[in-house]
Image (cartoon, rainbow, N blue to C red):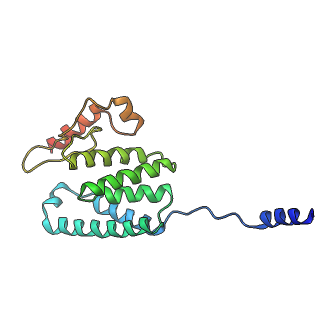
Amino acid sequence: MLRLPIALVALFLATPAPAQTADNPEMAKLFAEDQAVRKNVKPEQYKDMAFVRRMIADDAARRARTRTLLDTGKLTTAEDYYAAAFVFQHGGKPEDYLLAHTLALAAAARGRKDASWIAAATLDRYLQSIGQKQIYGTQFGRKGDAPMSQEPYDRTLIPDALRTALGVPVQAEQDKRLADMQAK
């Protein structure tokens, strides 16, 4: 009678533990491609419509593939979710930004400490895309020939202490960055 429990314990101990889930290499590649397009881009390149159309098409393809990876359970780690958040942050619809925000939260929940910045940025972008004011101040842009701006922006809701806790520049740093952008 005692042999059966001992045999079960021995079998349990002899069974290898499941391997740690590894980061998805395809997602890492999609993220690297997403970032490479934006690295060292000069503002005048955004006036080149062929460049912009190619970037938008490539972004859409990366989002489609990332969505497939997500829907099939192939994204599971903090790194996967972090990378996917950036890919969806470069979407064009409120749903893209809201999914990016959720992915950033998942990355933070899985231990990626710097995911708090992308969580703030995705929420700001989502809010602006639905006609609301951003709350962290992560989004800069211009409409037509207007000067660079962060508007619409509710500067009163989030204190700088919370921005700092989330890895978002405080308002004084944002103001300096905006002034630098407007001077160019």
- Identified at 47% across, 63% down, the residue is 75
Residue nearest the observer in this picture, 158 or 171: 158
Q: Quadrant of residue 55?
A: bottom left
- Identified at 75% across, 67% down, the residue is 15
Residue nearest the observer in this picture, 126 or 79: 126
- Identified at 34% across, 60% down, the residue is 87
Q: Where's residue 128, x and y in %?
A: 22, 46
On screen, residue 89 versus residue 73, left or right, reads left
Q: Is residue 131 above or below residue 160?
A: below
Q: Is residue 8 above or below residue 117?
A: below
Question: Where, quadrant-wise, is the N terminus in this rendering?
Answer: bottom right
Q: Quadrant of residue 124?
A: top left
Q: Quadrant of residue 132?
A: top left
Q: Is residue 121 above or below residue 75?
A: above
Residue at the limit of the structure toward the left, as seen here = 145
Question: Where, quadrant-wise, is the C terminus in this rendering?
Answer: top left
- Identified at 47% across, 57% down, the residue is 79
Q: Where's residue 69, x and y in %?
A: 42, 68
Number of residue marks? 0
Q: Where's residue 63, x and y in %?
A: 33, 65
